[in-house]
Amino acid sequence: MTKPHEKPVASCPKCGAPIGDTHPYAWCSNCGEKLPSEVIAKLPKIQAVEAARTAATAAAAATPIRPFRGSALSGWFIFFAILDFIAAAVGLLMAFTGSAGEVGTGVTLFAVGISGAFLFLALAKILDYLREAVFRLRNLEEFATPRPNQALQPTAPRSDA
């Protein structure tokens, strides 16, 4: 529907309602019918929204996504896991080649070394998963946050027909 200060540029193909030059939607506000592309091309507000959407899409495509980097702390956990594997190997060596008194110490060292190594590897993996989750959430937040010059496209009304 046109307002008194609007200049009609077209009419709705379905209901015949006049569409003014300041019409803000890509559909008829009277009947909800989607307007043809020829009519939309004559509406400056819709063209501005399309231009803003195109610019935002181009800016998002031009913005590189930073690659995920593991943490230095997870590197230390892996280092300690390697030390524990070495301790487990020494314990195994002591258990099979040592004297009777060293067998018990070797078995204990093997058990502690293996369990410590797996614990440190699990902690490193958990830390990497958490850092990657935070990284992805930040990327999503940056992508979803509207920029000051980014206009939002109005959505069509729902028809219950």
Image: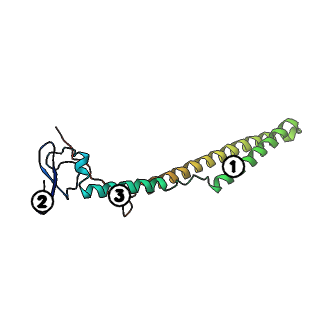
Residue farthest toward the left in the current orientation of the protein = 4
**Of circles 2 and 1, which is in front?**
2
The span from disc 2 to disc 1 (Cα, nearest Å) is: 70 Å
The x, y position of residue 13, in whole percent, is 16, 43
**Circle 1 sits on which residue?**
78
Quadrant hosting residue 121: top right
Dot 3 or dot 2: first in sequence order is 2
Type of amino acid at the residue the image marks with label 1: Ile
What residue is shown at x 75% (from left), y 49% (from top)?
83
Query: Which residue position is annotated with label 3?
Result: 52
| Res. 76 image quadrant | bottom right
What residue is pinned by disc 2?
Answer: 3
| Residue 70 or residue 161, whichever sits in front | 161
- Tag in front: 3 or 1: 3
**Which comes sooner in the sequence, label 3 or label 1?**
3
Circle 3 — which element?
helix
Secondary structure state at the residue bearing disc 2: loop
**Which of the image's four quarters has the C terminus?**
top left
Label whose residue precedes the other's in the sequence (2 or 1): 2
